[in-house]
Image (cartoon, helix red, strand yellow):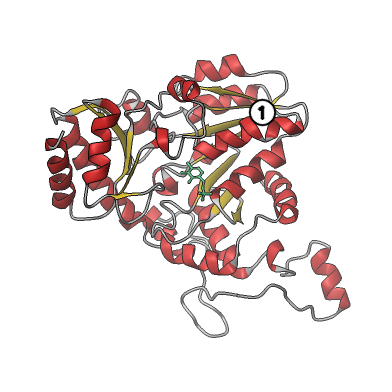
C-alpha cells in the first residue's frame, strides 16, 4: 500500500489503498470474483489459518474488498476497515461486537430508522438495554450514562433532523465511563468529517450514500482506530457473515473516486438551494448545517469541512403543503436514500421513520411537516426553478 497519508484529501480519495496490478499493469483494481483461494501446500494453508497474511476464503478477506477497506480506513485515519454487505450489516457488526447481556447503550434519539428500531425491537431479547437522548447537548449524554453503558452510538449530522453532536465532547464523556464511542458518519462522509480524529473509537458508513454516490449499490463499512478493536470487530463480522462481495466492493471503488468532486458540487447546490428556501415566504423553517441559522453552526464549522448536501425543511401549511411539494417536483426524485448524484426527496414521518412510534418521533423533533431533501449535482438553476414552481402551488 502506498503511503500517501500526508497528501491532500482529493489525492487520498483517488489513490489510498490502490496499487497498479504488478502482474498486468492494470490501473483499476481487478474484481477478484472468487469464493476461495488455493494454498501452495498444507503448511501454507495452516499458516494462513494461523494468522499469517494470505487469502483463504472470500468471506474472510478478498483483494478487491481489501482495496476498498484500505481506502476508506485511510480517509478516516483508522488502522483498518471491514467491508459489510450493507450499512445495517455495519451497524449490527458494531452492536454485536460491543454489546452483550446486561449491557446498556446510549444512542442519538434521531438515528437512522433501523439503527434505532433494532435496538428497541431486537436487542432487548438478548438483555441489552438502550437509552435515546438528544446528543446535540452533551449534558444529555452525561446524564444517561450508567455503570453498564458499554457503547455510545452517535449519528452526526443526524437523520433526518440534521442536528449535530459534538464528537469530542461526547467521546470525553463516554471514555470517562469506559464506554466505546461509535459514530455513523454517513451524512458527512470522510470528505467532510473524521470522527476518529475527534476521539471516536469506531466510525461506520452506509456506503450506499455519498461514498458510492451513484444510487446503484447497497454497502457498508466499519473503520476502527486501533488494531485491538479491529480484531474484535473482525472476529464477529467474519463469522456472522454480513460481509462484502468483491463485485460490490469494485463498484464502490469506482464510485468513491469521485467523492470529492461530487461532494463539492452537491454542497454548492445545497447551500444555494437552502439559502433560497430560507428566504422564501412559503417556507416555515429549514435546518442545514451550512446555514448560519443552524442552531449549531459554530460546531459545524469546528468539526466539519462543509455543511453536507442534505437538509430538512417544513413549509407553511404543514404535512398537506409538504405533500404538494413532494408530489409535484420534477427534478428531485421521490425516493428514500441520499448521497447520490441525483437529488432525492422524501417524507421521513411516513417513510424512513414510520417504524418509530409517533410520540417518540415527535420527541426526537421528527415532525410531520419535515421534508428531507438530498441535493444532487444537477444544474442549480433547474433545482431552484423546480422548487420555486411547486412552492407557488401552495
Ligand atoms: C442508509 C443509512 C444506513 C443504513 O445503510 P444501508 O446501506 O441502507 O443498510 C445507516 N445509517 C445512515 C445514517 C444511513 O443513511
Question: Pointer 1: residues within 10 angstroms few (<14), some, or many (20+)?
Answer: many
Residue 92, quarter of the rendered image:
top right
Residue visible at 32% across and 23% down? 295
Q: Is residue 38 above or below residue 209?
A: below
User: Which sits in the foreground, 57 or 127?
Assistant: 127
Residue 68 falls in which quadrant of the image? bottom right
Q: Is residue 385 visible?
A: yes
State whether residue 77 is above or below residue 287: below
Q: Residue at x 83, y 68 (%)?
A: 47
Kindly indicate the quadrant of the structure image that contains residue 178. Answer: top right
* Residue 8 vertical position relative to residue 347 in the rendered view, above or below: below
Q: Is residue 25 left or right of residue 127?
A: left
| Residue at which label 1 appears | 179
In the rendered view, does 206 fall on the left or right side of 188?
A: right
**Residue drawn at 59 percent across, 56 percent down:** 85
Residue 101 placement (x, y as % from top left): 78, 30
Which residue is outermost to the bottom? Answer: 24
Picture coordinates of residue 306, whole percent (x, y): 32, 40
Residue in the foreground of this view, choosing between 53 and 118: 118
State the image coordinates of residue 38 (x, y, percent, origin top left). Answer: 76, 79
Foreground residue among 105 and 335:
335
Residue 1 visible within the image: no
Amino acid at each position: 500500500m502506498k503511503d500517501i497519508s500526508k497528501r491532500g484529501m482529493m489525492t487520498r480519495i483517488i489513490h489510498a489503498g490502490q496499487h497498479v496490478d504488478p502482474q498486468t499493469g492494470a490501473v483499476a483494481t481487478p474484481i477478484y470474483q472468487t469464493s476461495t483461494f488455493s494454498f501452495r501446500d498444507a503448511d501454507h494453508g495452516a499458516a494462513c489459518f494461523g494468522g499469517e497474511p494470505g487469502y483463504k476464503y472470500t468471506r474472510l478477506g478478498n483483494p478487491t474488498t481489501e482495496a476498498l477497506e484500505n481506502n476508506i480506513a485511510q480517509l478516516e485515519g483508522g488502522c483498518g476497515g471491514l467491508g459489510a454487505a450493507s450499512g445495517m450489516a455495519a451497524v449490527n457488526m458494531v452492536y454485536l461486537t460491543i454489546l452483550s447481556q446486561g449491557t446498556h447503550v446510549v444512542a442519538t434519539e434521531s438515528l437512522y430508522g433501523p439503527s434505532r428500531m433494532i435496538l428497541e425491537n431486537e436487542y432487548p431479547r438478548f438483555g441489552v438495554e438502550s437509552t435515546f437522548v438528544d446528543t446535540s447537548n452533551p449534558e444529555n449524554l452525561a446524564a444517561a450514562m450508567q455503570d453498564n453503558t458499554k457503547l455510545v452510538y452517535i449519528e452526526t449530522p443526524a437523520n433526518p433532523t440534521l442536528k449535530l453532536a459534538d464528537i469530542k465532547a461526547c467521546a470525553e464523556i463516554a471514555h470517562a465511563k469506559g464506554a466505546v464511542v461509535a459514530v455513523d458518519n454517513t451524512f458527512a462522509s470522510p470528505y467532510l468529517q473524521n470522527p476518529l480524529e475527534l476521539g471516536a473509537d469506531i466510525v461506520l458508513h452506509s456506503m450506499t450514500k455519498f461514498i458510492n454516490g451513484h444510487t446503484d449499490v447497497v454497502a457498508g463499512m466499519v473503520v476502527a482506530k486501533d488494531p485491538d478493536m479491529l480484531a474484535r470487530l473482525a472476529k464477529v463480522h467474519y463469522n456472522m457473515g454480513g460481509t462484502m462481495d468483491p463485485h460490490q466492493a469494485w463498484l464502490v471503488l469506482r464510485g468513491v473516486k469521485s467523492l470529492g468532486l461530487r461532494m463539492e458540487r452537491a454542497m454548492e447546490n445545497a447551500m444555494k438551494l437552502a439559502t433560497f428556501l430560507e428566504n422564501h415566504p412559503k417556507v416555515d423553517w429549514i435546518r442545514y448545517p451550512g446555514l448560519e441559522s443552524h442552531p449549531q453552526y459554530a460546531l459545524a464549522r469546528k468539526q466539519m469541512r462543509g455543511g453536507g448536501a442534505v437538509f430538512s425543511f417544513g413549509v407553511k401549511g404543514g404535512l398537506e403543503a409538504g405533500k404538494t411539494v413532494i408530489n409535484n417536483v420534477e427534478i428531485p426524485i421521490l425516493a428514500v436514500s441520499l448521497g447520490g448524484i441525483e437529488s432525492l426527496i422524501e417524507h421521513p414521518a411516513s417513510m424512513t421513520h414510520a417504524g418509530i412510534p409517533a410520540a417518540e418521533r415527535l420527541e426526537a423533533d421528527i415532525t410531520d411537516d419535515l421534508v428531507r431533501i438530498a441535493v444532487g449535482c444537477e444544474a442549480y438553476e433547474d433545482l431552484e426553478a423546480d422548487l420555486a414552481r411547486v412552492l407557488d402551488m401552495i
